[in-house]
Amino acid sequence: MVESPFPGITIKAFGDGQMGQLIQAFDWAKTSLGPYELWPTSLKVHVSTILALPTSASIFWGEDLLQIYNDSCSKTMGKRHPANLGLPVKQGWPEAYAMTESFFKRIINNAEVVVLDRAFMPLERDGFIEETYFDSTMSPLRDGEGLIRGVLSLNSENTEIVLSERRTEVLRKISQSTIAPADHFKSLMQIFASNPYDIRFALLFMPDGLEPKLKLVANFGIAEHLVSGTGFDKLMSYIRATFTSNIMHEINDIQNLIPHAPIEPWPELTQNAVALSICSADLKSSKGVLIFGLSPRLKFDDHYRNYFTDMTQKIANALEADAQTRQALKMHKSFEFVNSVLENVPLMIFVKDAKELRFTHFNKAGEELLGYNSEDLIGKNDYDFFKKAEADFFIEKDRATLAGGKTLDIPEELIQTRLKGERILHTKKITLFDEQGQPEFLLGISEDITDKKLAEEQHKLLLQEQFARIEAEKMIQQRDDFISIAAHELRTPLTSISLQNQLIAKFLPTLIGTPNVEKLMSLTQNCQAQIERLTKLVENLLDVTRATTGRLVLDKTEVNLSELIQRISKGLEVELNKTKCKLELQLDPLVKGMWDAARLEQVLVNLLSNAMKFGKGQPIVISAKAEGAFAVLRVQDHGIGISNEDQVRLFNRFERAVSITSFGGLGLGLYISRQLVTAHGGTIRVQSELGTGTTFIVELPL
Amino acid sequence: MFRMAKTILIVEDDESIRETMQTVLELEGHDVLTAENGHEGLKLLASEAKPCLILLDLMMPVMNGWQFAAALENDLKLADIPVIIVSAYSDKAINIKSKAILKKPIDLRALYNTIKQWCP
């Protein structure tokens, strides 16, 4: 039994724990503490106390600060347990003591209490110096006399918490950042750089363009020029295997593959690395491969391993999201393109929802056609803009389209627009289906064919007119042909009749003395006059056909116009007397030219006959003179005159200025006269006033 | 060659005109040969004595006046017979070598004068 410094407390043993037994079994005689039995009671009490503590606790006692620790502590010491029991701190924790020596001194010399919060502690406990973190309270331990003889260190390791926190932080950053090829993964490398204790280096390999060949696209911790050389091929084979298999590869000889110096702040070489495929959870396709350099001061446990897996996964998701965003952007752009096409085509394009047939889209051409803004139209239906009957028609067609599920073609439909009045549309209606195959929208495309229709109708009208004109011309041709044939056919019997009548007239005088012979002679004379009149009519008709077919042939000789006029007026004396028109001649003696005398006579007779016919018994003046290069002939009467509108058509075929009931004739005289004068290279025109008389002026080239 | 001083050949397709002209000429004391067309006219000229004058219509079937006149001109034995055109187509007759043109309807006096000139 040991004497107790504290009355009532007896220290029997150090309990049943492993450390308790170890301490009792330990040969303390070899140490500066001396045999256990010689220990001061205070130390024994202290040891008993820490052995009873559930938390990690150590006592460093004596000049050399020999370590005695409890069970809980032994679990954090790795391979240092149990060797460190009874070893001076300097010897037992050389790497840690470098940091903590000053603390020990202050505690022992100044009786201070040192509290460390998550203190970094390089502990070599598993054969390598490990990066560890501890909360520690170090306080002085006194002996029975109250002298400070040692240090009590109460520790709680929170390496796991520290690692977990900083790793979580990196994962958070990855989630929050935009990871995209756009910045050549600079932001990603910066995130890696924020956690150099876990990520010694990082190399990102990705397919080069469309080629399956993988290429280094970003790096952190190792300079790019180092990623080459003899070991590089082997590295690439790891990378390719990872890329195709999507399985994590541990690389234990990274120094062989990429020889590189120790990376700050650790003096140890980085020997291990992992290669991970950047692949989203669905494992569909890998986007690349990441190689991470492992810390030489960390155990490659499940946490560490999962950290890399999680990180890569997150990067894969981010890249996937980026690709989707770009795809969406591309879709958006192509949608924009289609939209702008739809917006700018000159056809009205509208979309209605299939259920209520309300407008959901309207393009520019549609707005212009209907005279409403898109904003006014969207959400409304046909009944808001059109009359009921019209809207009924549209809706009926819409429903038919949706029911049939096919394109409905409406060649023509009338629509009442706000600004352009009634328009004719050619409309196609098309059903747009949703993913379930149910009609979702009705697409309408309408072309305004109003102008086209109008043009078509005008064209039709034009064709009709053309046809009518051709028909009319054909009729005129037939008429002219008929006249020509009729005239020729009339002339043959006329010749025969005329010849026979002349023969009778010639022989009748031999019968003088027979009763009524004088009367017969007068009859044959009348008969001959009528035959000649008929002959003239036939000749006129023939002249018309000659003129229209361009077969007027002139027999030109030198003609004195004044003489011709005198001769003709003499020949018409009987008629002049009958009409009581006095004839006044104003003739220059020499008006000579190369003309067809018979044809000029025809013109003169015609003009003079007209003058007598319409002259109301008033004087008729005929003048002829040379004026410059022309012979000018005027035939002036003082009769009824011709109205302006009649003057216009006076020289046309079968036209007459007066009604046929008052004055006879075929209405060919002036037409033939004009043709004859024109054939001579001359002109004929009329000057007239109703009620005062008419003057015909003929100009013939001299 | 001997030429019948009084014989006149009428080549005319219209029967009424042909017969009336025949009457007119016979009343004047001429012998008259008649043919309905140029072809018949040429046949008559080949078989009968040579006339002193030919009165020729132009528009005829089988062989028209122009063809007849051309055939006549190419026959040395007949080429010297004077030809008078009697036609409504006076303006078309210009191309034919003829002694005169009588325009239909025929003026009787003009016909007498012409005949007197060539068949006295």
Image (cartoon, coloured by chain):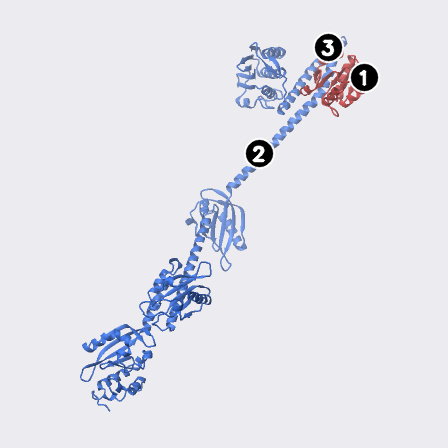
Chain colours: A blue, B red
Please tell me if label 2 and label 3 are on a single chain. yes
Is A26 in front, or is A578?
A26
Q: Is mark 1 on a helix, strand or loop?
A: loop
Q: Which mark is residue A593?
A: none
For residue A50, which quarter of the picture?
A: bottom left
Few, some or many residues within 10 Å of mark 1 (<14, 14–19, 20+): few
x and y, in percent, of residue A453 in the image: 53, 41
The chain holding disc 2 is A
The residue identified by callout 3 is: A518
Farthest front residue? Answer: A230
Instruction: List x then y, in percent, for residue A678.
Output: 58, 20
Q: Name the residue under label 2.
A: A465
Left or right of residue A358, residue A173 in this image? left
A534 with respect to A193 (left or right): right
| Mark 1, residue position | B49
Tally of marks: 3
Task: Please identify, in this view, whether the residue under mark 2 or under mark 3 is nearer the observer.
Answer: 2
Callouts 2 and 1 on one subunit: no
Three-letter amino acid code at the position of disc 3: Glu
Q: Which of marks 2 and 3 is nearer the N terminus?
A: 2
Residue toward you, A530 or A137: A137
Q: Which of marks 2 and 1 is in front?
A: 1
Query: Crowdedness of circle 3 by 10 Å Cα count: few (<14), some, many (20+)?
Result: some
- Chain ID for label 3? A
SS class, disc 2: helix
Q: Relative to the observer, which residue lies in front, A132 or A82?
A: A82
Q: In which quarter of the image is residue B25?
A: top right
Distance from the alpha carbon under mark 2 to that under mark 1: 65 Å
**Kind of residue at badge 2:** Glu
Q: Nearer the observer, disc 3 or disc 1?
A: 1
Quadrant containing the C terminus of chain A in the rendered view? top right
Chain containing the residue with disc 1: B
